[in-house]
Image (spheres, grey):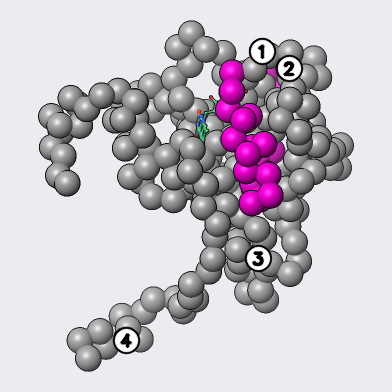
Amino acid sequence: MYLSKADIENTERIQRLNIINSISGIKPGNLIGTRSNEGQANLAIISSVIHLGSNPAYLGFIVRPSGDVRRHTQENITENGWFTINHIRTEFIENAHYTSAKFDHNVSEFDSCGLTEETINDFHAPFVKESVLKMGLRHVESVPIKSSGTTMIVGQIEHLVMPDHAMNKDGYIDLGLADGVGISGLNSYYKLEKLADFPYARVSEKPDFDQ
Ligand SMILES: Cc1cc2nc3c(=O)[nH]c(=O)nc-3n(C[C@H](O)[C@H](O)[C@H](O)COP(=O)(O)O)c2cc1C
């Protein structure tokens, strides 16, 4: 199949949304936990988390244009600056998926979707107890992406919790051993399996692929 820009623009809306949401490849499966200043916990599935730097340790994620719908995650982060990123495990993908429903702001997705709030080191934002790889972050900046009307929310990691057995001596984390999941589009979930490890790629050490 080949689609030109015009074909993409003429594709039926939902089909286009599904195609374009899938073609970036596998995205990380995370739940973002926040709490309003009034104490209301909120949890939302987000597949756009990306690495932005190791020192300082920065991660970012993209929030969609709000339009008429309130974005509780963004509102809470703007209000007090704290959020958690919790890796989704294979055993609770369905619970995680339903956090994307448009719940009222006074409803906790933890309660509605069968997940458990956890407090770590008095951190203001709630962690997901069922997640084994999770982080608490402080909001650093929100960057508007004018071309798409989206916003990148950047945070610095202040707390990091992960399973000892999933990390090797060099600090690489085997996300398969941590039972992590990948996401395609907006409703397909994949199991992760590590295929290989390669050393830092140097021109002088490149294998001879012509053989
Ligand atoms: C698989 C999946 C991935 C999603 N990823 C994102 C994302 O990266 N950014 C975003 O703004 N919304 C994303 N959503 C939609 C949010 O989960 C949804 O809008 C949710 O209601 C937001 O909750 P909130 O209003 O409590 O912040 C995703 C939904 C699904 C099902």
**How far is the residue under mark 1 from the one under mark 2?**
5 Å
- Upstream in sequence: badge 4 or badge 1: 1
Residue bounds of the magenta highlight:
79-102
Q: Is residue 131 above or below residue 153?
A: below
Image-quadrant location for residue 118: top right
Residue at point 31% right, 30% down? 15
Judging from the image, what secondary structure is the residue with disc 3 in? loop
Residue 207 image label: 4
Disc number lying in front (4 or 1): 1
Q: Nearer the viewer, residue 205 or 173?
A: 173
Q: Position of residue 149 (x, y in %)?
A: 38, 21
Judging from the image, what secondary structure is the residue with disc 2 in? loop
Q: Residue lying furthest bottom in this view?
A: 211
Disc number lying in front (4 or 3): 3
**How far is the residue under mark 2 from the one under mark 3?**
33 Å
Left or right, 13 with respect to 122, comes to left
At label 1, which amino acid type do we have?
A: Asp
- Upstream in sequence: badge 1 or badge 3: 1
Q: Position of residue 192 (x, y in %)?
A: 54, 60
Judging from the image, what secondary structure is the residue with disc 1 in? loop
Asked if disc 1 and disc 2 are in contact, CB closer than 8 Å, the reply is yes
Residue at point 48% right, 8% down? 68
At label 4, which amino acid type do we have?
A: Pro
Quickly name the residue at label 1. Answer: 104
Number of marks drawn: 4
Residue 107 image label: 2
Asked if disc 2 and disc 3 are in contact, CB closer than 8 Å, the reply is no
- Upstream in sequence: badge 4 or badge 3: 3
